[in-house]
Amino acid sequence: MQNHVAFLNEWGDNSLDFEKKNENGTITSTHFIVTALTAVRGDAIEIRRILSAIQKRYFQGSALDSNVVDNDHELRKLILEDLCEAPFQIFALVVDKRQLIGEGLRYKGSFYKFLYRLADRELFRIFPDLQMIAGEIGSDSFMEGFIKYVQQNHISNLFNESSFGFVNAQNEAIVQAADFIAGTLARCYDETVIADQRQDFLDVMQPKLMTIKFWPDVFNPYQVRYDSQDQQYDKGLAELSINLANDFLQGRAKSTVPHVIDQVTTLSYLVFHFRYINAIRYISSFEIMEHIKVRRGKAVSLHYFQTKVIAPLRDAGVLIASSSKGYKLPANESDLYDFVNHSNAIIEPMLSRVKKFRDQIRLATDGKLDVLERNEYSLIRKVVD
């Protein structure tokens, strides 16, 4: 039985001609965005309850519509804040169409097929038992073709219960909410409608952002939120952090081992927030563990998270800074010292206790028993001595 459901919508057009206007007089979008609001099936009733209140509060009971809000950015932010009270997560695919020139994708058919593969791969990698729901659409849209693509590539069987359903978007508030989120993300990335308030929008959505998959996925330090005059950001260290993280992710992405999947989930989350949300912000253990819970369908303990997720990532050479505020990829020298200081606050008292323990035993045995004399304790012995 499918445990997760995704409600999909899209934003943007299929034109790759950026020199002229479209048939309806609009300017060709620079990006194409696919948004999926994912949720545990049992939460759909609560989501609809919250969305119904939003419709009454902001849309006079009518459909949630990003176009109605348009450039009223303060209103958009208020609606976003209310939307994020609902128990869903946001998955998005953001494609910079300007980078498709020369990729053999100038025609709508090949362009859409390219997007089908991207969206399908990312969604079903996260939730192999996902049911997807989209609004009723015409025959010339991305969703219509995507539905056929999914049906052809995910035949229901005992091992894969994925399916695709249609609803009337006027009657399905969650599909409307996916449209609103897609329109908001457009104002964060598309050059034709980008807003000065884009970082405010991302900050509001941040707790709900499972991931945003960007294409092309090229590290660009200027996509990271930081002040170029601020000493809190070190470009070289940031690139090292990302490169080491990507090396791990590329080597483990296809693993089916549960704790490795949790490591990939955690590191992907850290990379995403570092690159596209805030390179300076620490992310709490609780927030990351909640993200793991969404992916695997059940909660993990703090001990498991620390010993089976964070520790192995560090053992593999991934740079993860930590402090009392949580975890992050290091972006500056201060982050490095945060990790060392945090570790020192744990290690130094422990070594002190070991020393006292050792001294008490040696004193009680007239020096005949040294609990650190064995070879396996040579490193601790050197530090204590």
Image (cartoon, rainbow, N blue to C red):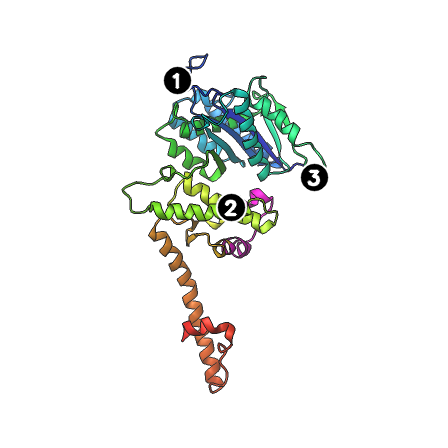
Classify 10 Å Cα crowding around label 1: few (below 14), some (14-19), many (20 and above). few
Q: Earlier in the sequence, mark 3 or mark 2?
A: 3
Marks 1 and 2, Cα distance to the nearest angstrom?
Answer: 38 Å
Q: List x then y, in percent, for residue 151.
A: 65, 28
Q: List x then y, in percent, for residue 50.
A: 53, 31
Could you tell me if residue 385 is visible in this image? yes
Could you tell me if residue 135 is visible in this image? no
Q: Residue at x 45, y 41 (%)?
A: 272
Q: Earlier in the sequence, mark 1 or mark 3?
A: 1
Q: Residue at x 34, y 45 (%)?
A: 235
Q: Which quadrant holds residue 203?
A: top left
Please tell me whether mark 1 sits on a helix, a strand or a loop: loop
Q: Give the overall secondary structure of the magenta segment.
A: helix
Q: Find out whether residue 178 is within the magenta segment.
A: no
Please tell me whether mark 3 sits on a helix, a strand or a loop: loop
Residue, far left:
229
Identity, as a three-letter code, of the amino acid under mark 3: Phe
Magenta segment, which residues?
A: 292-312
Residue, far right:
158
Residue 313 position (above or below residue 130):
below
Q: Is residue 224 left or right of residue 62?
A: left
Q: Which mark is residue 245?
A: none
Identity, as a three-letter code, of the amino acid under mark 1: Glu
Q: List x then y, in percent, for residue 85.
A: 49, 35
Q: Which mark is residue 19?
A: 1
Viewer-proximal residue among 197 and 157: 157
